[in-house]
Image: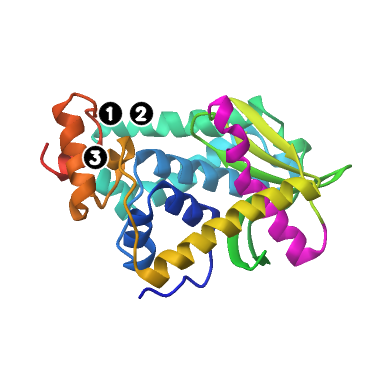
Amino acid sequence: MPDLPRSFSPSSAGTYRQCPRRWRFRYVQKLPDPPGEPALLGTFAHRVLELLCGDPAPERTIDRARELARQVWPETAESRDFQALQLDEASQRDFRWRAWTAIQGLWSLEDPADVEVRATEQKVSANLDGVPFFGIVDRLDADASGLVITDYKSGKVPRERDRSKSLDQVLLYAAAVEDSSGERPDRARLLYLGSEILETSVTEDSLGATTERFSDTWRQVGEACAGDRFEPCTGPLCGWCPYVDRCDEGRLEVQQRVAAGRMRADAPARALLGL
């Protein structure tokens, strides 16, 4: 019978909701889950912006961001995960251009020189409705209204029907900050770099609803661990699961989708399964 993890994060909760079987592979068996190109691009952009916002406000310029990107690039290029992508020279140039486009996109949303940054990459631990929460806040800001939780996103803005759910992550960060500091943030924001800002007020109702959903997922994880029963949720995302070769249901799902012409050509599972 698997033990419950010592802490639970928004990403862990999201993985469980996506597929309990994948959660077991990742968090119980602790099998590697190598990041793909979009995740590495986001990590690179986050690192540059973290360093930028650690500088004094007047120095947070696009030229400074460009300088930091040049400094940070070797860390990414020489990492094992990036090397595993086996990108040719043209693909690496495209990666760097897309990463820079994301970084530069911050200025289309706000001028970081005008932001009062309290902390970057702030680790927060808390007990949220009985759940041992852990997370890392990209940026903790302050303005005239109070504390502001800010999280960067380098991907696409979610569809209208998914926007509220997307804000759960930053609301959980807000709840954790309040639990650890005693100060409730005023707002929580997702900055989709180069696109738009999704923002919500932090209220008793919004925190209560979000922590209740988080707690319910934790309860489901506990029940799954107690019975060592982690059912797969098959679908299009099986094509991007790094464990699909270990999952009979996932393998069959990918095979059927490929045969029916309903699986993208760039789905990693095709190469993993020789399809």
Is 167 a magenta residue? yes
| Label 2 element class | helix
Looking at the image, residue 6 sits to the left or right of residue 257; the answer is right
Cα–Cα span, label 1 and label 2: 6 Å
| Label 1 element class | helix
From the viewer's side, name the closer residue of 25 and 87.
25
Cα–Cα span, label 3 and label 1: 20 Å
Neighbor class of circle 2 (other Cα within 10 Å; few <14, some 14-19, many 20+) is: few
Q: Which mark is residue 94?
A: 2
Q: Quadrant of the C terminus?
A: top left
Residue 139 position, x and y percent, is 67, 49
Residue at point 17% right, 45% down? 272
Closer to the chain start, of discs 3 and 1, is 1
Is 29 a magenta residue? no
Which residue position holds label 3?
268
The reply to whether the C-beta atoms of the residues labelled 1 and 2 are less than 8 Å apart is: yes
The reply to whether the C-beta atoms of the residues labelled 2 and 3 are less than 8 Å apart is: no
* Magenta stretch in the rendered image: 159-183
